[in-house]
Image (cartoon, grey):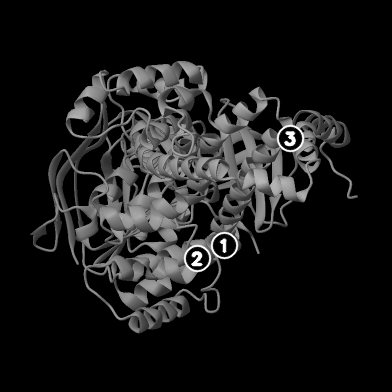
């Protein structure tokens, strides 16, 4: 089911949570709404679900205007950050709930069969008789997903689905959700503030700031070509250097980079830690190392440029560097944004 | 005994047990002791006299009626107080506790004044052919009044803590309002409702001050057990008073044990494996 948001606005008392958002989600697509807290991403998701009503604008499911359809008739599956499982029902009863209260009457035997199918789908066979308090967080979120899928929703909506879980569980569940999505092909929209999660999981990432879409595209598009410094910073660690653009080149304390088509003037230069390197001879940005952080896959170096700017970059594990060393930071590639 | 990180267990346990023993167990033991001094035949004769039986009947039935009424009305009141904010909300919320604060005799006199045949309510109800003052209905109303806060105050915090996401989840799964109330909210409130019911019922069984003014106190029809005990005391028949009181004590104890058991059953799902 294709979803379309057309100039949607939502205000809470005096706070404009969502300002004129238009967005299309193709049928079968898996889309992430990514943004910091307060960016309006959860509000958008809740409006698509029907848990909030839009003040202005329209939301279409396919060709149907769903703006005023209440949540119980909208045919969406919603997965909450903190699972929202019914604590007094077993796992199987939780999954069966939607089928039991549905206006479409089903045979008890048919419901039982469906519950077993769903338990298998979310790999929780044999846990049907447990209560939510008796299973782990990752298992609970899988039950919540099975419960949402039980009513054959046209659209699956997930609000920070893995936000409350440990890093390892989160990574597993991400892969698994991707598999389920390709198996069922259901249109899925999820909200996250974790850029890694959005980039790992989604076909398309929609980045939000202050209730507005700042950029959208495939993970490759948004990573390779961030349109604003906000997107650049939000998608990952970035070093920022004050720079100046003159005649198609940006100059920043000892480094220069080609920028075609930018007007002369003050600018900021952004570089990922992997885009910087360390050398003992120039040319480069003169700096001294303040600290070295050893990690499983390399060494992260914290340095201070002569101009006082803090820099972070990665070097290979074999590289012998230590705090107090002086040298030059070289630039492999960078993005320049006018200020 | 396992070592406990939290300090002060032996001391606090000792102090509280000593206190419970002194204030609760000792008087009750004295009561049982006094009743036991009667001997089985006399005891049985007193507790099963027709006047005593009639008093149990009116007390227990009225208490049950009052508790059932409070169950519904208390739940509705707790619901309104947690879900809606309206002008005067704070005043209504504070008024729920008034029956706790008001001397019960004052409540009894006020209720009697309202419900006698020439009172504000009594005259209207009298026209409809309903007599409240000096009937078991009056007893029930007095019991309702004094035990209402128990249900409201046990249910209210649970209702406040109920995660709104549970209802949203149930709605997104297609549940109607009634289905959500019956299958999600009510089961989660059951333990609190049971606790409120048991307190409310126990309080109604023992209520004295509010009832004696409105009840009329006719032996065999509107004489509650607590009053019968009081009459026996006035006659210096301490043993008979203790014997009848022991019946009341047992009933309350049985009732509290039963609701405790039901509560622990209703809370089975919270037990981790």
- CA–CA distance between discs 1 and 3? 69 Å
Do labels 2 and 1 touch, CB within 8 Å? yes
Chain letter of disc 3 in the image: B
Q: Which residue is mark 3?
A: B239
- Number of marks in the rendered image: 3
**For this view, does B71 lie left or right of residue A151?**
right
| As drawn, B255 above or below A29 | above
Residue visible at 40% across and 73% down in the picture: A180
Front residue (pair A89, B73): B73
Estimate the x, y position of residue A225 in percent, counting from the top left: 34, 51
- CA–CA distance between discs 3 and 2? 72 Å
Instruction: Judge the density around disc 2: few (<14), some (14-19), many (≥20) Cα neighbours within 10 Å.
Output: some
The reply to whether residue A80 is in sight is: no
Residue visible at 57% across and 51% down in the picture: B259
Residue visible at 25% across and 23% down in the picture: B121
Q: Which residue is mark 1?
A: A169
Estimate the x, y position of residue B57 in percent, counting from the top left: 49, 45
Q: Say yes or no: labels 2 and 1 on the same chain.
A: yes
Looking at the image, is mark 3 or mark 2 nearer the viewer? 3
| As drawn, A243 above or below B251 | above
Q: Which residue is mark 2?
A: A173
Label drawn at residue B63: none
**For this view, does B76 lie left or right of residue B205?**
left
Q: Quadrant of the C terminus of chain A?
A: top left
Q: Secondary structure at mark 2?
A: helix
The reply to whether residue A218 is in sight is: yes
Q: Secondary structure at mark 3?
A: helix
Q: Secondary structure at mark 1?
A: helix
């Amino acid at each position: 089911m294709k979803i379309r948001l057309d100039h949607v606005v939502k205000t809470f008392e005096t706070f404009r949570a969502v300002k004129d958002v238009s967005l299309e989600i193709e049928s079968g697509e898996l889309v992430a709404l990514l943004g910091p807290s307060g960016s309006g991403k959860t509000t958008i998701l809740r409006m698509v679900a029907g848990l909030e009503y839009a003040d202005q604008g329209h939301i279409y499911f396919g060709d149907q205007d769903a703006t005023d359809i209440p949540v119980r008739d909208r045919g969406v599956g919603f997965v909450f950050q903190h699972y929202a499982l019914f604590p007094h029902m077993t796992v199987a009863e939780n999954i069966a709930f939607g089928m039991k209260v549905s206006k479409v009457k089903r045979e008890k035997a048919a419901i039982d069969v469906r519950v077993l199918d769903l338990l298998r789908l979310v790999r929780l066979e044999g846990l049907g008789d447990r209560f939510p308090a008796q299973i782990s967080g990752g298992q609970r979120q899988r039950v919540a997903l099975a419960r949402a899928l039980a009513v054959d929703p046209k659209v699956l909506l997930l609000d920070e689905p893995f936000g409350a879980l440990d890093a390892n569980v989160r990574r597993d569940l991400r892969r698994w959700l991707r598999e389920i999505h390709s198996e069922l092909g259901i249109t899925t929209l999820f909200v996250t503030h974790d850029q890694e999660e959005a980039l790992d999981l989604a076909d398309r990432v929609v980045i939000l700031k202050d209730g507005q879409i700042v950029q959208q595209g495939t993970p490759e598009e948004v990573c390779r070509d961030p349109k604003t410094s906000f997107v650049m910073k939000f998608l990952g660690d970035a070093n920022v250097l004050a720079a100046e653009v003159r005649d198609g080149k940006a100059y920043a304390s000892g480094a220069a980079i080609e920028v075609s088509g930018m007007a002369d003037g003050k600018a900021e230069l952004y570089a990922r830690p992997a885009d910087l390197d360390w050398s003992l001879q120039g040319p480069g940005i003169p700096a001294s190392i303040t600290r070295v952080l050893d990690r499983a896959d390399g060494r992260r170096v914290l340095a201070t440029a002569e101009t006082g700017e803090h820099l972070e970059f990665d070097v290979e594990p074999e590289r012998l560097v230590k705090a107090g060393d002086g040298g030059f930071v070289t630039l492999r590639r960078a993005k320049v944004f006018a200020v | 005994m396992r070592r406990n990180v939290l300090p002060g267990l032996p001391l606090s346990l000792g102090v509280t047990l000593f206190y419970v023993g002194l204030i609760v167990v000792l008087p009750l033991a004295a009561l049982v002791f006094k009743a036991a001094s009667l001997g089985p035949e006399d005891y049985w004769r007193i507790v099963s006299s027709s006047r005593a039986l009639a008093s149990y009947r009116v007390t227990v039935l009225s208490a049950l009626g009052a508790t059932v009424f409070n169950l519904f009305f208390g739940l509705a009141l707790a619901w309104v107080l947690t879900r809606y904010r309206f002008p005067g909300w704070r005043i209504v919320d504070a008024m729920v506790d008034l029956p706790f604060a008001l001397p019960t005799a004052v409540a009894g006199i006020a209720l009697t004044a309202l419900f006698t045949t020439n009172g504000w309510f009594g005259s209207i109800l009298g026209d409809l052919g309903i007599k409240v003052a000096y009937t078991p209905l009056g007893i029930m109303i007095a019991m309702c009044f004094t035990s209402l806060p128990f249900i409201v105050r046990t249910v209210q915090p649970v209702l406040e803590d109920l995660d709104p996401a549970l209802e949203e989840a149930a709605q997104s799964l297609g549940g109607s309002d009634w289905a959500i109330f019956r299958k999600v909210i009510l089961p989660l409130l059951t333990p609190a409702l049971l606790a409120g019911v048991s307190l409310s019922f126990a309080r109604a069984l023992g209520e004295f001050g509010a009832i004696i003014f409105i009840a009329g106190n006719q032996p065999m029809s509107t004489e509650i057990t607590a009053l019968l005990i009081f009459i026996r005391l006035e006659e210096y028949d301490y043993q008979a008073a203790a014997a009848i009181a022991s019946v009341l004590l047992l009933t309350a104890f049985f009732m509290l044990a039963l609701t405790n058991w039901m509560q622990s059953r209703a809370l089975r799902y919270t037990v981790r494996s």
